[in-house]
Image (cartoon, rainbow, N blue to C red):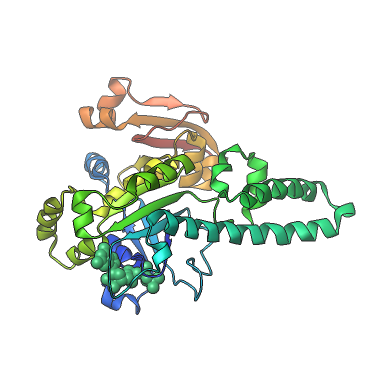
């Protein structure tokens, strides 16, 4: 999974990147501005212990901190395969990096980033529509469909609305057609509110209620982080970090809270594959079938899918071995339509 940090210059993107990834900010400009962090999941080790796996492979989250272009708030090139956008909004004062007066309000900051995303999508949409309209008489069926969808999208964007608000209504065939445009505003969005220590401790800042309400109505997830404080913590030994976090009033580092927010917002679940060789965590969207899970493991498994065996995590922990589970009838044989649940241990039987 891949996420990209965007936001106003000086909003604290690099500070938060460093807090989330423990990349040294001083060396940040020398390093690649992308880092993968393992997604912590205690179930993984527990499963691996039972199967005596040689290798344990967590889900990884890749975080990107891309350069902002001269004007505007969004990097010129957001990689097309980014799964979600993390919009950093600033609610701290820093006389060395003042914000323009009209952008001090978090909602206005967010709105200006959102408007830029929408505008960029609109430009892409219109330029393609123009081309299609030029050859109006000789469009293929697919092009006619494309024309119809793009008109619909243009209407949404022209009203100042991001595309993610209608993403769920699209047909699979429509999604496929528009995927090549790599629209920006179609991706799930999570706001990271970057607070200074005082405001973070008070859990309050000017405009908070209105901002949260706006995001909720629009369908954007929200998480508060004390960026600078946590960035500084990453420079301490990990035993000391926990005490400082507790002093700040949080039980876990912001990376944990952010991953949780991303999972919840995107409706993601975790399933596992496990044997002697390796125990591995993988993600799926809630409501996806075991055939889709097979596809994620290996395309051959999906192609030659016969059936799957499902073990519930709690059952595995309680009974401790495949043998005991089998005796209790707790290894469930399912067909390709089975909807995978969070915590399922999935074993695909296939033949190619
Ligand atoms: N007081 C305070 N300062 C912060 C906080 N977070 C970031 N800063 C400071 O704000 C300045 C800008 O932060 P960056 O992380 O570089 O911002 P950015 O979004 O990466 O900026 P660009 O890369 O220029 O777009 C730095 O001097 C940070 O130290 C915070 O929570 N409190
Ligand atoms: Mg930066």
Where the C terminus falls, by quadrant?
Answer: top right
- Judge left or right: residue 66 versus residue 91: right
As drawn, the residue found furthest toward the top would be 328
Residue 125 seen from this side:
yes
Nearer the observer, 144 or 277: 144
Between 101 and 219, which is closer to the camera in this rendering?
101
As drawn, is 278 to the left or to the right of 154? left
Task: Give the residue at the far front of this rendering.
Answer: 101
Residue closest to the eye, 104 or 49: 104
Q: Residue at x 66, y 48 (%)?
A: 153
Which quarter is ligand 1 in?
Answer: bottom left
* Spot occupied by residue 274 in the image (x, y as percentages of width and height): 33, 42
**Could you tell me which residue is drawn at 35 percent across and 78 percent down?**
29
Q: Please give the name of the residue rendered at 45% of the width and 46% of the height, measured from the top-left corner.
A: 297
Residue 126 in the image: state x and y as whole percent. 71, 58
**Residue lying furthest right in this view?**
137
Q: Which quadrant of the figure has residue 133?
A: bottom right
Q: Is residue 280 visible?
A: no
């Amino acid at each position: 999974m891949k996420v990209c940090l965007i936001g106003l210059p000086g909003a604290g993107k690099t500070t938060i990147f460093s807090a989330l990834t423990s990349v040294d900010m001083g060396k940040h400009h020398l390093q690649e501005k992308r880092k993968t962090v393992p997604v912590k999941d205690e179930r993984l080790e527990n499963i691996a212990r039972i199967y005596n796996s040689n290798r344990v492979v967590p889900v990884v989250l890749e975080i990107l901190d891309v350069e902002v272009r001269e004007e505007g708030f969004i990097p010129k090139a957001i990689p097309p395969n980014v799964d979600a956008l993390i919009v950093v909004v600033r609610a701290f004062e820093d006389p060395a990096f003042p914000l323009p007066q009209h952008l001090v309000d978090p909602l206005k900051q967010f709105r200006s980033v959102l408007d830029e995303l929408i505008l960029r999508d609109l430009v892409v949409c219109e330029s393609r529509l123009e081309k299609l309209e030029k050859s109006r008489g000789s469009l293929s069926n697919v092009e006619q469909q494309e024309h119809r969808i793009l008109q619909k999208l243009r209407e949404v964007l022209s009203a100042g609305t991001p595309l993610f608000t209608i993403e769920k209504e699209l047909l699979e065939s429509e999604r496929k057609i528009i995927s090549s445009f790599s629209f920006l505003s179609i991706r799930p969005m999570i706001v990271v509110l970057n607070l200074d220590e005082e405001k973070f401790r008070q859990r309050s800042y000017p405009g908070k209620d209105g901002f949260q309400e706006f995001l909720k109505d629009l369908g954007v997830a929200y998480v508060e982080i004390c960026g600078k404080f946590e960035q500084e913590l990453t420079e301490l030994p990990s035993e000391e970090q926990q005490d400082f976090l507790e002093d700040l009033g949080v039980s876990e580092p912001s990376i944990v809270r952010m991953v949780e927010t991303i999972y919840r917002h995107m409706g993601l679940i975790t399933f596992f594959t496990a044997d002697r060789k390796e125990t591995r965590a993988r993600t799926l969207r809630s409501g996806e079938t075991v055939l889709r899970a097979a596809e994620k493991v290996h395309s051959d498994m999906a192609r030659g899918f016969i059936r799957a065996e499902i073990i519930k995590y709690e059952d595995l922990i309680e009974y401790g071995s495949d043998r005991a589970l089998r005796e209790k009838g707790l290894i469930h044989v399912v067909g390709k339509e089975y909807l995978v649940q969070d915590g399922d241990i999935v074993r695909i039987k296939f033949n190619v």
